[in-house]
Every structure is written in C-alpha cells, then in structure tokens.
Image: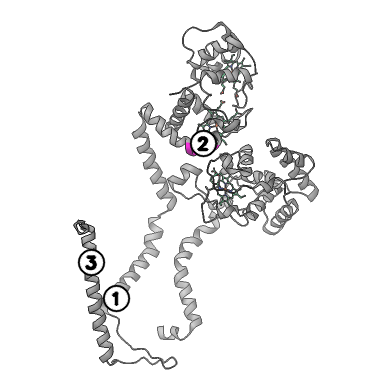
Amino acid sequence: MNWLSDNINLLALIAAVVIVVLTVLVAGKYIKQMKTDRSTGELAKENWDGIGEYKNELPSGWAYTFLGAMIWGLWYFAIGYPVNGYSQIGEYNEEVAVHTKMFESKWANADRQTLQEMGEGIYLVQCAPCHGIAGDGMDAKAADLTVWGSAAGVLDTIKNGSKGLGYPMGEMPAGLLDGDSAKRVASYVANGMKGEKPAEFAACAGCHGVDGKGMGGMAPDLTKYGTPSFVADVLNRGKKGYIGTMVSFKGRLTPIQEKAVGTYILSLSRGE
Amino acid sequence: MFHWLEKRPFFFAVGVFLVIAFAGLIEIIPDFAQASRPVVGTKPYTVLQLAGRHVYIKDSCNACHSQLIRPFKSETDRYGPYSLSGEYAYDRPFLWGSKRTGPDLMRVGEYRTTDWHENHMWEPSSVVPGSIMPAYKHMFTQNADIETAYAEALTVKKVFNVPYDKPGMPKLGEWEEAKKQAMEEARKIASEMKNQDVKDAVANGEIPEIVALIAYLNSLR
C-alpha cells in the first residue's frame, strides 16, 4: 500500500489529524470553562420572561469592520453603482465585441479541414433538427443534403423544378430536360460550369443567362452552385419550396460560420 | 435606539424590510417604468395565438422550457438576441420559466416552422433522435378553447387598454368577427400541415389545439 505516496492523500491525512487534535483541545477548554465559569458583567435593563442580556462591548475588530462596510455601502449606493453605470448589457456588448474580433482574426484564413469541423458543429446545433443528423432530410422532411449541391442535386432540380428562394424570376418549372441531356447539363453545372458547354444548356440560358450567372440577380447564379457562397445565399433568403419551409438565417451566422456550414454540407453530397 | 426597536416587533419588521429592499429599490425602480413599455414592434396576441398560449400553459411546457434569453454570448449564439423587458408587455402572465430541460423558446418562431412543429409535437424523437420531450398526440384531436381566449383578449383590452383594434395592431372586434378571423388564421396553418384529421377538422370549422399552439409558437420571435 503506497497511497501515502500521493501528496494530496498525505496532506489530507495530516489535515485530518490536525483538525481532530484542535477540536479535542478547543472543545476540552470550553467544556472546562463551562463547568467552572461564573457569569460577570452588567445586565441590560430588558428582561424577557426571565431571560436577560449582558451589555458587552462589541469587540473592536468587529466594530471597525462593520463601520468600514457601512462606509463602503454608502459609497456604493451613492457613487459606485450609479456613477460607474455598470450594466449587464454593456458587459455583454464588450464580451461579444472582443469575441468577434478574436474569432475573425483567428479563423480568417482557416483551411478546409478546419472549416468543415466548425461547420459540423454549427450544423448539428442549427440544422440537424430539420435536416437530420446525417443530412438526409429524414424522409423528405427537408432537403436531402446528401444529394443537394452535387450533379444529382441539379438533376433533381431539373426534374422537379424549384420555387421559394424569392428570386424576381419566380419559379423554375419542372421537367425542362430529361434523359442524357439532363445528365450532361447537371454535371456541367455541378462542376462549376467549367469545360465544354453542352448545347442543351440553351434551355437554361433563358433564365440563368448564357454564362449561367443569373442575369444580374434575376435567377440564382449557377456558377456558384455547389459552393459555400451558394449555401450562404440560401441561408440568407430562406426557402418556401415543394418540400417545406427552410427558415432564413439572415444575421444569425457570421460570414465565416456560413462558409463553414456550407463547406460541411457540401462535403456530404460530394462525398469528401 | 436599538433597544427601542428590539421591543417593538412591528417597527423592527418595517426596519428590516427597508434595509433589505433598499438595494432592490435603488436598482429597479428608476428603470422600471421605462423598461416595461412595449418594445417597438411588439404586438398583442391574436385570439388564435392566445388560445395556443393557453394550451402551452395547460400542458406545462414552461416546466421544461424557458422564454428568456439572457445576455450571454453562449445564449444569443444559439437562441437569438437577448430578451428585453418590453417584449413581455402583453404577456399575462409572462412565461420566463426557471428550468431548461429543453431549449429556450423565446424566439423559436425564427427558426422552426409549422411542418416541423407538426412532426415534433406528434413524436419528438421522429425529428430529434433520443429526445426526452413527451409526445402530445392528444392535441391533434382536442379542440382549442377559442371562447376563453376571446374573453381574455377582450378583458385585457378593456381593463389594461391593450391596443387591440388600433392601427397596425391585431383586430379583435365582436365575437363573431373574432371567431371568423381565428378560423382564417387556423386554415392558413392547417394548409401547411400534413395530418389529415387536423385538416378535416379545420375544414369543418373546428380548431384543434395543435393549430392554436403552432400559431402561438410561430408568433414567438
């Protein structure tokens, strides 16, 4: 048994012994005093059913502490509290300002891995109750994020149409293309519209523009589809679509957090 | 002087009260009248929302949920801006709660929707795995008490001058009008729900509790 080799145990044991010894000594002293002492001093005039009270002076240490506390109390009531104007809200504002500054400088150039991890945390708190922990939309209760943002997601949109993001162009009709032509366009859009443009994209150009950039905000900018900045756009607009209502997160996440959660959900559909 | 006080329990009690109340008085009173005015944009509840609020109270949601976001970063990050006194101006009684078994609901209307509440109130664990919140299936069949809600709204309008029927504020009007308006709000909510029994009930002119409750939850912003 070497439990005494632990400092804490040893100290605790010593302290316990000291406490026991002190208790016995002090208790013994007072018990003896009770046996032999006689009361002295002057009694106060009052007498309550035979119980009197001595007029003992307050010990001076107590008296000074009490006076000091009173002076401090008056200072606090008259000057300390009202003049310094402490407020909980003020403290909150300072705390938030400090935090925001630190947050922004610390994560301004965060790499993908970091953003993805941060995004997962935000996702689990803010988005998982609707989209499910796995992001699958829980039996179509919300958008299936394991599909949205990839070529399969574009294909879905082409097949079913889309509404509710609140673009001036309004709704996108269902079934504009099908079969292989739809697939070609989908993978072209999902790859950031790089490479050779399939001829069928003409079906989309009427609304999204020949360059896919959405004709100056009339329809979504397809060159951003599948990037965190498209997600940020969705978060700011909200969406009342065919599946249900996605709430707007406008002002509730910082730009870095939006980028992080976007990076995370896109990693779900792109298998990264 | 203290002997005098010691012998007079009544004045002793008054003295104790003054000493203890002093800090409270000096901190609370100057700000109170100002802070308890309604915040700009705060509106009284409509009759349907009030009926939902009665359901909320009846089913003791406030035993597990608070409605008070404190000014701490950890809370405002999760629930939205901290609460102001004036936001409770039309809450009788306020439902601050004192225990968070579940999350705060002060601004739940900002980030949850009718269809989500429908799934969640029917079976919480269907959307939040492992949720310990009870299911409230009975709300889908029991009807909400619109009469009492109307009576309350009318009472606070007459007694406390709550600004119903003022420009930009909810309409109250006569009972028949109020009932029609509550039905209309209920139909809007039911149209976003999937439960067929609820839809049928609303089409028949009834208002199940769940519809009123969702109206109330959506109004929490």
Labels 1 and 3: the sequence-earlier one: 3
Residue type beneath disc 3: Ala
Q: Give the chain letter at badge 2.
A: A
Q: Give the chain letter at badge 3.
A: A
- Which residues make up the magenta segment? A124-129
Q: Compared to A50, does B154 lie above or below?
A: above
Q: Which residue is mark 1?
A: A62
Labels 3 and 2: the sequence-earlier one: 3
Q: Position of residue B52 (x, y in %)?
A: 67, 49
Question: Which label sits in the foreground, 2 or 1?
Answer: 2
Please indicate whether residue A66 sits to the left or right of residue B1 in the image. Answer: left
> Who's the residue at 61% across and 54% down the image?
B91
Q: CA distance from mark 2 to mark 1?
A: 60 Å
Residue type beneath disc 1: Trp
Residue type beneath disc 2: Ala
